[in-house]
Amino acid sequence: MGKLRPGEAKWLAPGHRESDPLCFPRPHQLWNLLLLLWTLLNCSWWGSAQGPGEWTPWGSWSSCSSSCGQGLSVRSRRCIRFPGEELCWGNTHEYRLCRLQDCPPGARLFRDLQCALYNGHPVLGPQKTYQWVPFYGAPNQCDLNCLAVGHAFYHSFGRVLDGTPCSGDSQGLCVAGRCLSAGCDGLMGSDAREDHCGRCGGANDSCLFVQRVFRDAGDFAGYWNVTLIPQGARHIRAAHRSRNHLALMVRDGSYVLNGNWAVSPPGTYQAAGTHVVYTRAAGPEETLHATGPTSQDLLLQEQAQALGWSLRQPQPREVEPQPHETPTVLAVIPPRTPTPSPDPCPPCPDTRGRAHRLFHYCGSDFVFQARVLGLLHQAQETRYEVRVQLVYKNRSPLRALEYVWAPGHCPCPPLALHREYLLAARRLISPDGTQDRLLLPHAGYARPWSPAEDSRTRLIARHCPV
């Protein structure tokens, strides 16, 4: 560096060296002495390496280490550092769990294949060879410990390959000689866990905790709606303690547990994309657990039995016995003189609307889907024979085949043969107790069944007064 002329000052930026090896001007004046001190401090700070080096970006993930089941993918990065810099902080490799289709039955395990590589090769001597199978009793699960077939010793061949299961019943995989499990982010050795809402690494603040108490149904028999478990629900638990039973229905109206007046055995059931664990102790207590998330709505009900009722033994209703078969007799029947046809039935009143549906659903003893199989006019009554297909509400058990009675020769609304309806009926018991009928009131609720009508009926059930 040249000399500074009087009245001329030359500044050095931090970290900049104009000449080598000196990085400060020759002292000349007082001002230059101050400049010298400032330059020495900056040369001392910026001339040496500070902190660790820098990582290159991560490379792409490798293919899975296994062709079926679960294995590992790996990616790597390099540390770039100058002389005097520290090593980079972190790992050069990152491992991710990969899941493929299940291995076919009879496929050899990954550890078995690694032990079999040493079959027929001398290991403990120049002439002695053995057949090897995995040995899981050694201390380190991630060493390739193989047992000599027919002998009482095993040999360790070093580490197993990355991606080898730690043991036969473990979910962990061996990575660089260590048994690691994957976090919810899929990375091996990660501490990330799902919260109760199902978010990886969440804080349980993205979902709503719901807790409800249902009062017992009393002396009424039937299936009572407790609560609708929505799609996506997690960590479901229902506890019940009474002589009644929990029941669980899926969206199409079929039962998972305790449906059709039957009591299901305790166990694990598959419903709505999750496992439902149903337990029942010797006493009146029973519980229902499901981890979720549910793939569709579930309806939790209480199967309530009235006193004097027993499952699979519903109270008999008036059902005509079928006549015995008689021989067919061919005869010539004289033609009858035509009789005048009766007057046509008057039009039925309009019963459409939400208020009408709410009134009949909440005030009826039975709401069910049925198919009309036959009809018979008797005096001032009309009797329909129906096949019950789906029950929405019932105060007592319904059988597969029932009779539904409607007042008058022209019932309102009329039901057509071989069509499906959603019916709201009342229970009518004669004073002497000899007749127990399902009554469809005049201008009652009888709508052609459709998916839209099904949805409206399920929705209106939530608005009945308690």
Image (cartoon, rainbow, N blue to C red):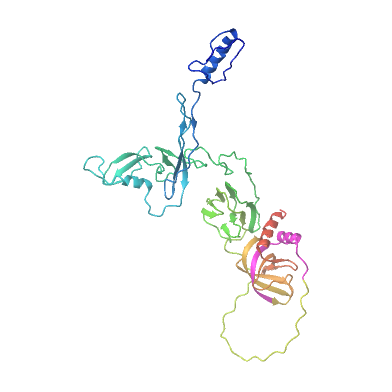
Residue 153 spot, x, y in % from top left: 28, 41
- In this picture, residue 394 sits left or right of residue 23: right
Figure disc tally: 0
Residue 273 spot, x, y in % from top left: 55, 53
Q: Nearer the viewer, residue 268 or 366?
A: 268
Q: Nearer the viewer, residue 427 or 388?
A: 388
Magenta span covers which residues? 348-376
- In this picture, residue 149 sits left or right of residue 206: left
Q: Is residue 460 magenta?
A: no
Q: Nearer the viewer, residue 381 or 373?
A: 373
**Residue at point 55% right, 15% down?**
39
- In this picture, residue 148 sits left or right of residue 65: left
**Residue at point 33% right, 41% down?**
145
* The quadrant where residue 420 appears: bottom right
Residue 202 spot, x, y in % from top left: 58, 39
Residue 320 spot, x, y in % from top left: 63, 74
> Could one spot residue 315 in this view of the protein?
no
